Image (cartoon, rainbow, N blue to C red):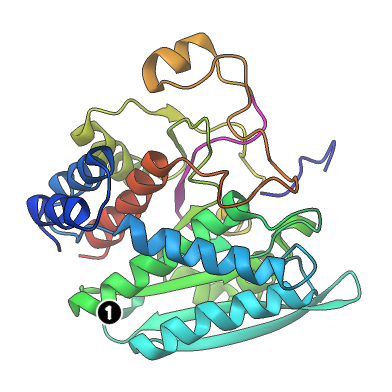
Amino acid sequence: MKLPLSGRALAAGAVAVATLMSGGSVAGAASASEGATATAAAPDIPLANVKAHLSQLQSIAAANGGNRAHGRPGYQASLDYVKSKLDAAGFATTVQRFTASGRTGYNLIADWPGGDANQVVMAGSHLDSVSSGPGINDNGSGSAAVLETALAVARSGHQPAKHLRFAWWGAEELGLVGSRYYVNSLGSAGRAKISGYLNFDMIGSPNPGYFVYDDDPVIEKTFKDYFAGLGVATEIETEGDGRSDHAPFKNAGVPVGGLFSGADYRKTSAQAAKWGGTVGQPFDRCYHSSCDTTANIDDTALNRNSDAIAYAMWELSE
């Protein structure tokens, strides 16, 4: 997430058994199974797979100066990694070039063949980090979960009525540059074909909240219904409003929604009573810092939000 202007389908039982047999925790198995229970039409998104993508992004940052920032080798390597997974799964991928701050940037767009091209349901996340760290929660978490959801589409052979599109944005941290470039490139006719854009920016915060965008009411209700099925309370997302890649879509009249687990705002006592965690501490104490590594992730939040992405993409594309 960019700085503010002022600063800046497996069955539940099978999942549980497989997790336990592979040495996973009972808590991890239960977390995986609760998502599967709530998402009858959508497959469970394996937490282990999402975390494997995060490990790859961490390794990429470590090999490239400690970050995956716009115009740096770590960003290019991150894009190459995601693209290779999508290409192998049968997606039609497009790399879109743009320039920001004197450096070349890239968006990655992946279309799943089939569905009504005049009704596009789209999920996206920014792939770049800040220059000060590897950006594993911000926003490896969203990028990895969107990637694994796309791969789940391919594994299941899902063929919904609407067309599915996934995107990874460049230069978000410089002011939503990549997503704005994409929205502008569509023109009015292209934008009119997008039934909904779902944004995922920071969904594994270590002291997490469960925040839902209150933009398009249908998308909002879809996410709220999912979390209600888990017995997890949600709040309206306000910390990141206008600060992530949904903003260019929203400003162009495209219905938008999304999820967020919190950045540098501090958790209140009322929020801790609902969600657990530490009162008075930021949702993500490593926001935009070098400590935003694979150790800076809450597995339960990442798992629930990843499953929620799949649930929404399945529900909204029918």
What type is the residue that disc 1 sits on? Ala
Q: Quadrant of the C terminus?
A: bottom left
Q: Does residue 221 appear anywhere in the picture?
A: yes
Residue that badge 1 annotates: 154
Left or right, 64 with respect to 292, comes to right
Q: Is residue 255 above or below residue 193?
A: above
- Find residue 30 and report its horizontal and vertical position in percent: 20, 40
Residue farthest to the top? 269
Left or right, 196 with respect to 185, comes to left
Residue in view at x 60 percent, y 78 percent = 79
Nearest to the observer: residue 148 or residue 175:
148
- Find residue 208 and report its horizontal and vertical position in percent: 49, 32
- Find residue 302 and report its horizontal and vertical position in percent: 41, 47
Residue 257 drawn in magenta: yes
Residue in view at x 35 percent, y 48 percent = 303
Left or right, 72 with respect to 47, comes to right
Nearest to the observer: residue 134 or residue 124:
134
Residue 77 drawn in magenta: no
Magenta region, residue range = 253-265
The secondary structure making up most of the magenta span is loop
Residue in view at x 67 percent, y 45 percent = 243
